[in-house]
């Protein structure tokens, strides 16, 4: 704490290496943290405003997104407030680095002063993977299934994180089909899965080839508009993890059970769900939310595919950031004099 009457908090910077070490150490605990945040959201104990998109007229493919959020204190948790600032520059891929980079700022509940800045691309990928794994567990447990065939469409960082979380949480993969527009990425992902001793890993020849194979299908692409239009590809009543949000046509959405993380967040920004709302004129096709499923143990019938479309909520980033900081706080030296001119007059 500072010398200003012990009012102004210390400020710490947590590197990606430290963040990665905490989150990889106990993936089951990470999922518990994410699910606890979802439950707080279901209890209306969160503030999660719309994300703000900063776009650039000279480079329309690029964007930086601000996700402010707040989680109220609960019986087993402290309040947490902050904002994630995450950029997506697809051209980074041609430079050999991930398209996304991010920081997370946490704020003191009493003074509002920032208390920490954490590298957040790892937090963001982790909360996405944990969210997808939570939804998968809910659906498979309700159907008494533990072993599935997985299809990966979009072989990037998010897919890697999702596979790590699925397998860490006891979901067995009997086989995997991998598809990516860049066959090199698909091959690299397939080789990594083989090193993980996953059986029957094949690079798929098309999106259709992968989708028809998978009992769980993971979409983690950079698609800006729907490119999958045939609902028959999903007729075997599987789970679709629609993490990239814009891959599926309205017909596929309307013929499925749809799970979201938050309906108001998911039905905007030209997502497949938003386009479906525009076409249908209502939101009746949204079946339930993951927070509701966690709170009430909702089980869905088996007569249609289940699609999980999470927009991504700032409360999850905050919950994981708070968890990381609680683990490393005493090992990270505060930045002296970060807050400097503190006299009022």
Image (cartoon, rainbow, N blue to C red):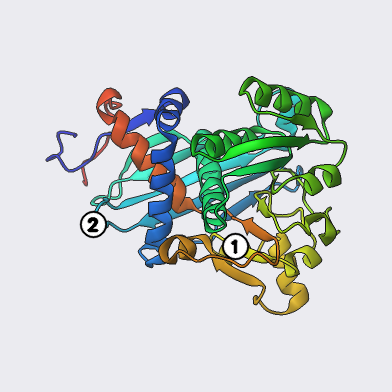
Closer to the camera, 115 or 144?
144
Q: Is residue 339 left or right of residue 275?
A: left
Closer to the camera, 152 or 62?
152
List the single residue furthest toward the front.
144
Q: Residue under circle 2?
A: 75
List the single residue furthest toward the bottom.
281
| Vertical arrangement, residue 238 with respect to residue 90, above or below | below
Closer to the camera, 135 or 116?
135
Q: Residues within 10 Å of mark 2 (few under 14, many from 20)?
A: few
| Vertical arrangement, residue 183 with respect to residue 109, above or below | above
Label 1: element kind? strand
**Residue drawn 48% across and 45% down?**
84
**Residue drawn 40% across and 32% down?**
26
Q: Quadrant of residue 231?
A: bottom right
The CA span between labels 1 and 2 is 28 Å
Viewer can see residue 203: yes
* Residue 60 position in % (x across, y down): 76, 47
Q: Nearer the viewer, mark 1 or mark 2?
A: 1
Q: Is residue 92 left or right of residue 165?
A: right
Viewer can see residue 318: no
* Residue 14 position in % (x across, y down): 39, 29
Q: Residue under circle 1?
A: 259
* Residue 90 position in % (x across, y down): 72, 37
Mark before the other along the chain sequence, 1 or 2: 2
Q: Which mark is residue 306?
A: none
């Amino acid at each position: 704490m500072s010398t200003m009457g012990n009012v102004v908090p210390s400020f710490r910077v947590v590197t990606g290496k430290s963040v990665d070490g905490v989150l990889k150490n106990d993936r089951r605990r990470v999922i518990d943290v994410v699910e606890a945040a979802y439950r707080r959201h279901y209890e209306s104990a969160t503030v999660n405003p719309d994300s703000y998109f900063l776009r650039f007229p000279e480079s329309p493919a690029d964007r930086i997104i601000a996700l402010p959020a707040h989680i109220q204190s609960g019986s087993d948790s402290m309040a947490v407030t902050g904002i994630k600032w995450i950029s997506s520059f697809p051209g980074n891929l041609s430079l050999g680095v991930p398209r996304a980079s991010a920081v997370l700022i946490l704020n003191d509940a009493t003074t509002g002063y920032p208390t920490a800045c954490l590298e957040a691309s790892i937090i963001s990928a982790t909360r996405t993977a944990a969210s997808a794994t939570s939804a998968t567990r809910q659906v498979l447990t309700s159907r008494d299934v533990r072993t599935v065939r997985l299809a990966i469409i979009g072989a990037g960082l998010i897919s890697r994180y999702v596979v790590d979380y699925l397998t860490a949480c006891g979901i067995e993969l009997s086989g995997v089909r991998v598809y990516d527009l860049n066959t090199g990425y698909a091959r690299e992902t397939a080789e990594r899965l083989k090193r993980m001793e996953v059986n029957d890993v094949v690079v798929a020849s098309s999106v259709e080839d992968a989708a028809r194979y998978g009992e769980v299908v993971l979409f983690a692409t950079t698609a800006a508009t729907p490119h999958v239009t045939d609902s028959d590809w999903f007729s075997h009543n599987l789970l679709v993890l629609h993490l990239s949000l814009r891959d599926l046509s309205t017909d596929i959405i309307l013929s499925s059970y749809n799970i979201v993380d938050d309906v108001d967040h998911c039905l905007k920004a030209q997502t497949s769900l938003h386009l479906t709302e525009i076409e249908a004129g209502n939101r009746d096709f949204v079946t339930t939310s993951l927070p509701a499923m966690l709170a009430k143990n909702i089980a869905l019938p088996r007569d249609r595919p289940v699609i999980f479309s999470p927009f991504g909520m700032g409360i999850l980033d905050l919950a994981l950031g708070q968890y990381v900081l609680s683990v490393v706080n005493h090992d990270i030296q505060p930045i002296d004099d970060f807050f400097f001119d503190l006299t009022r007059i």
